[in-house]
Image (tube, rainbow, N blue to C red):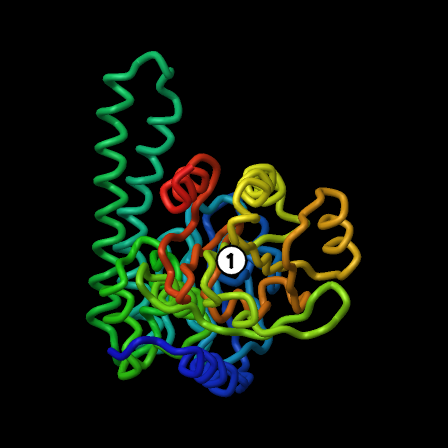
Amino acid sequence: MARLSLLLLCLMLCLVSVAQEQLVSYSISGTVPAGVTTVFLNTPHNEPIDTAMVVNGKFQIAGSLLFNSFVTLTDNGSDLPLNMLIDGTPVEVNMERSVLKGSKLNERLNKVDREISDLTIDYMQLQMDYAQVPQWQTVLRDSLRRVTTAAFNKVVVEMKNVIRTNSDNVIPALYLSQIYNTLTVEELKEYLSEDHVYASHPLCVGAWRTLNHYEKTNIGTRYTDLVMADTTGLKHQLSEYVGKGNYVLIDFWASWCAPCMLEMENVKAVYQKYHEKGFEIVGLSFDRGRQPWVSAIAHHNLNWIHLSDLKYWNSEASIVYGISSIPANILVDGKGFIVATDLRGQELSRKLRQIYKY
């Protein structure tokens, strides 16, 4: 697969938007275990959609959602959510057995989901066992850690198997959204092939951004230009400051990000030490409002170049470089090539000492 470009990423996001605009009606009914009083319908990110009260052991939820949306169903006694797909076909659920009847695709999803849930429950139990072992019992903790890691790997392997064997439908999108941060670049490229039906599903946006991040921040890769405004509102290209013969730290941060602000003391120290040698910093902020951004710069004496479009996680910096968590940074050499990423604390100081020899 060719190197992911910003154009391709934007195209994928446009396809996601267009493909998912169709609203379809849904009807979910079923039975619950004794003692259950409420059933909750949420998104895979646990955002509430609807709630139903249980009457005589039964419930019903109806409404409309985007076609091919994934939802989760839980009750006030569930260990794990029951996943399903909104595809216009009514769904009948047995919450006690975690079994549903509906479209062929929903029944297929339910089958693989129950297999994965069994492995997930084993993993969760081991996690709880590990948490209860005192710190001083190092041998037991090490043993349990290995067993817990092995259990987690079984979950990931099963999810990968589902992804590989369902490229002709959208089921993989659900599982890819849960494990993409554990995948290698090669796996992401394989799973996000444009030939796969699920690759343009909204749940895959995180995986696309992660792949974009890998592609745009590889050591030896040339930096990618972008346009953002300074604190006065004047727009600048990143290329005005990068690739001009000096080392530049491109720093992704925000005034609302506590870890970012803690790291600023280290960033200030290296700026003060090496700026006279040509070292520069360009801060790309993920702030939402101008005043908090400008106030943080002034209050903490961050006396370097600052740019932002004030779009939070929809910032061009986030999209272009695939940044999904901050603080983050990229160190670029005088020719505009990336030489290091995510340098913090002593790592940042050590790298600059190697470069400037003091």
Image point (22%, 33%), residue name:
147
Q: Which image quadrant: the N terminus?
A: bottom left
The part of the image, by quadrant, that contains residue 269 is top right
Can residue 84 be seen from the camera position used here? no
Image point (34%, 66%), residue name:
221
Image point (46%, 66%), residue name:
321
Q: Position of residue 296 (x, y in %)?
A: 73, 48
Q: Position of residue 285 (x, y in %)?
A: 62, 59
Q: Which image quadrant: the C terminus?
A: top left
Q: Where is residue 168 in the image (x, y as percent from the top left)?
A: 26, 80
| Total tally of numbered discs in the picture | 1
Amino acid under disc 1: Ile
Q: Where is residue 212 in the image (x, y as percent from the top left)?
A: 39, 68
Number of residues whose C-alpha sits closer than 10 Å to that of mark 1, classed few (under 14), some (14–19) or many (20 or more) = many
As drawn, the residue found furthest toward the top would be 136
Residue 67 as seen in the image, left or right of residue 109: right
Q: Nearer the viewer, residue 317 or 91?
A: 317
Q: Nearer the viewer, residue 301 or 257?
A: 301
Can residue 99 be seen from the camera position used here? yes
**What residue did someone put label 1 on?**
250
Residue 263 as seen in the image, left or right of residue 190: right
Relative to 115, is 212 above or below? below
Q: Nearer the viewer, residue 353 or 213?
A: 353
Q: What element carries label 1?
A: strand
